[in-house]
Image (cartoon, helix red, strand yellow):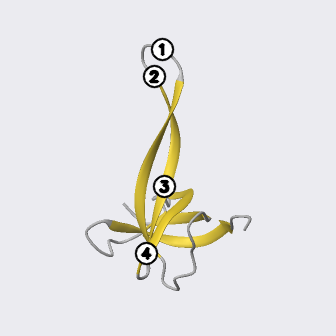
Amino acid sequence: MSENNQSIRTTTGRVVSNKMDKTVTISVERLVKHPVYNKYIKRSTKLMAHDANNECQEGDLVSVTASRPFSKNKKWVLVEVLQRPNN
């Protein structure tokens, strides 16, 4: 499969931790329909992303894309900071 046929996986989420060096933890929320009650439930996934410049703060809305594995759990890289919290 050539690189032209592969779609680049990108997603957005909130930074929940930036205590590590060059790494941020991002929470990505999605809506899942309950099979019996047909209500939509919020589910979240935590991703670890590479932040080369340590520019993210907790609460930032960021965009990340999938990349080569940087470590056991870190397989995403920061693309840009979309929104800063209003402090």
Q: Which residue is mark 2?
A: 34
Residue at horizontal 53%, vertical 21%?
39
User: Disc number at residue 37?
Assistant: 1
Circle 1 Cα neighbour tier, 10 Å, few/some/many (<14 / 14–19 / ≥20): few
The residue tagged with tag 3: helix, strand or loop?
A: strand
Distance from label 4 to label 3 (Cα)?
Answer: 15 Å
Amino acid type of disc 4? Lys
Looking at marks 4 and 1 on the same chain, the residue that comes earlier in the sequence is marked by 4
Which quadrant of the figure has residue 13? bottom right
Q: Which residue is mark 3?
A: 27
Q: Residue 27 location in percent, x, y? A: 48, 55
Q: Which residue is mark 4?
A: 19
Q: Residue 24 location in percent, x, y? A: 46, 70
Contact (CB < 8 A) between labels 1 and 2? yes
Residue at horizontal 57%, vertical 57%?
12
Q: Residue 54 location in percent, x, y? A: 52, 82
Looking at marks 1 and 3 on the same chain, the residue that comes earlier in the sequence is marked by 3
Distance from label 2 to label 3 (Cα)?
Answer: 21 Å
